[in-house]
Image (cartoon, rainbow, N blue to C red):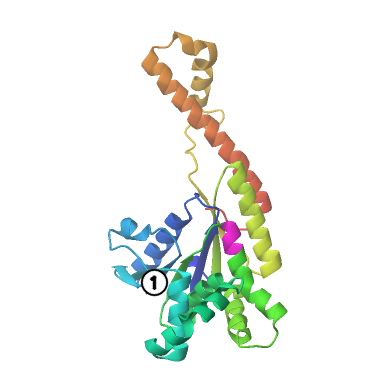
Amino acid sequence: MSLLDKHLILVAGKGGVGRSTVAAAIASSTSRAGRKTLLIEANANDRYGDFFGGPEVGPEMVKLGDHLFAINTNPGAALEEYGLMILRFRRVYRMVFENRVTRYFLRAIPGLDDYSILGKMWFHATKERWDTIVFDLPASGHSLSMLRIPSVILDTVPEGPLTRDARDVRRLLTSTDETALVCVTLAEEMPAAEARELTETLATELAIPTQHLVVNQTYPDRFPDGSAGDDLLDRVTGPEAEKLAPELAAFVAHADLIRHRRRLNERYLAELADTVKAPQI
């Protein structure tokens, strides 16, 4: 199956590598193909309203385009929605969830905030009619903690009120028929190292393989090795640059920087190809 045919697309990666931009591009593609698409942010500073020229995306679902909707959920909103689903009435919800003792108890449960967001994603993916859910996960370390929670629950509490839902969430996350994970990175040392660690941990520990690796912000290959442009740059950089007019010297320096950055990119692209067993985009 094509990536864009999957029901749930998880987009993961280090902060600052363009993860949200890639998630928005995927959601845009699926919605243009006529698939009813929900784009989910997790407790984030909203970017999607600006990306699509629509309203700011918050805890309430908004429409960003034909077949495209978005929500920026947070633990408080997710827990409230869950509580109302169980207790049915807002007055009863407030009596149970908003009293001081209950709030203190909820704050003491490790991982509850992350599990509430994960549970909301699972609810949209399984209980509502969406062709595609694109989940823009938090940054790498946080996303790993979030995705581990169903397995932690099943390992530590084999039977209990959370067990059935945790089992269903884990089944969805690990289903290669329904779900695909896209890892976003840069062809630079720290992002590439983090992408290797993230994809390996997801595959070996959580049984969530990476379907595609998106390497963002790569410099264009303007001066391939052995090309006329590469040869010319070799002849006008170094001591020869002192003979150039200032404007031309600045132009040459910029070209040489692009060549250097591209060669650095190629080094990390090769390392990623050797260590992350997923097609590169």
The image position of residue 276, as x and y in percent, is 65, 55
Q: Which residue is drawn at 60% across and 84% down?
A: 162
Q: Which residue is drawn at 41% across and 91% down?
A: 88
Which residue type does callout 1 highlight? Thr
Determine the secondary structure under disc 1. Answer: strand
The foreground one among 216 and 234 is: 216
The foreground one among 13 and 142 is: 142
The image position of residue 266, as x and y in percent, is 58, 40
The foreground one among 111 and 239 is: 111
**Left or right position of 23 against 265:** left
Q: What stretch is highlighted in magenta?
A: 140-144
Q: Name the residue under label 1.
A: 37
The image position of residue 68, as x and y in percent, is 34, 69
One can see residue 216 in this view: yes
- Say how many tags the image has: 1
Q: Which quadrant would residue 250 be assigned to in this image? A: top left
Q: Please determine whether, in this image, residue 61 is positioned above or below residue 143.
A: below
One can see residue 2 in this view: no
Q: Which quadrant would residue 104 be assigned to in this image? A: bottom right
Determine the residue located farthest toward the front in the rendered image. Answer: 100
Q: Main secondary structure of the magenta part?
A: helix
The image position of residue 22, as x and y in percent, is 45, 57
Q: Which quadrant would residue 169 be assigned to in this image? A: bottom right
**Left or right position of 154 against 25:** right
